[in-house]
């Protein structure tokens, strides 16, 4: 007797690593951006219809709104959430590099500012506070 083939159960997520609340927000932003990208035409149509309307946009732009909502609902899937999470992990090193470059620019600007105005160079926060206590 042959048994029917059953499909394997899907995994809840391809990247089950726990993220902080801020990181999860970044993943959600990527997810929303991806979904809005798929439905850009429908969003544009609704926005052009609703332009210069207030309450009347509810019934005047009903078809555009329904088209936009159905597009967004159809693309708002677990697959897209997983794809956004994978994209976030793929660009993690790039974001870290950008943060380091930003910090370096900040230090260079601080150094230039201090040289320009003839201010003494900053020492470590702990050392300067200790010196301030000693000089009092």
Image (cartoon, rainbow, N blue to C red):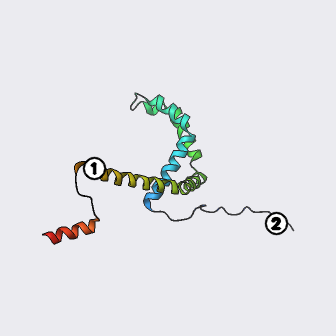
Which one is in front, 48 or 18? 18
Instruction: Quickly name the residue at label 2.
Output: 3
Q: Secondary structure at mark 2?
A: loop
Which one is in front, 124 or 32? 124
Residue 109: percent from left, percent from top: 33, 50
- Tell me where residue 35 sits by quadrant: top right
- Tell me where residue 38 sits by quadrant: top right
Residue density around tag 1, few if under 14, some if 14–19, many if 20 or more, within 10 Å: few
116 displayed left or right of 64: left
Q: Residue at x 40, y 52 (%)?
A: 102
**Gap between marks 1 and 2 measured at Cα:** 77 Å
Q: Which mark is residue 113?
A: 1
Which one is in front, 104 or 22? 104
Q: Residue at x 22, y 70 (%)?
A: 130
Residue 132: percent from left, percent from top: 18, 67
Say which label, 1 or 2, has the lower sequence index: 2
Q: Residue at x 35, y 52 (%)?
A: 108
Residue 60 visible in this rendered orientation of the protein: no
Q: Secondary structure at mark 1?
A: helix
Instruction: Assign the C terminus to one quadrant of the image.
Output: bottom left
Q: Which mark is residue 5?
A: none
């Amino acid at each position: 007797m042959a048994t029917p083939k059953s499909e394997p159960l899907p995994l809840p997520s391809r990247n089950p690593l726990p993220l902080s609340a801020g990181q999860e927000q970044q993943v959600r932003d990527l997810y929303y951006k991806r979904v809005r990208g798929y439905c850009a035409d429908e969003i544009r149509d609704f926005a052009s219809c609703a332009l210069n309307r207030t309450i009347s946009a509810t019934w005047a732009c009903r078809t555009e709104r329904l088209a936009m909502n159905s597009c967004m609902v159809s693309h708002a899937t677990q697959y897209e959430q997983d794809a956004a999470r994978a994209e976030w992990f793929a660009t993690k090193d790039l974001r870290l590099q950008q943060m380091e470059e930003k910090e370096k620019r900040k230090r260079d600007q601080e150094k230039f500012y201090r040289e320009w105005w003839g201010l003494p160079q900053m020492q470590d926060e702990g050392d300067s506070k200790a010196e301030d206590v000693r000089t009092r």
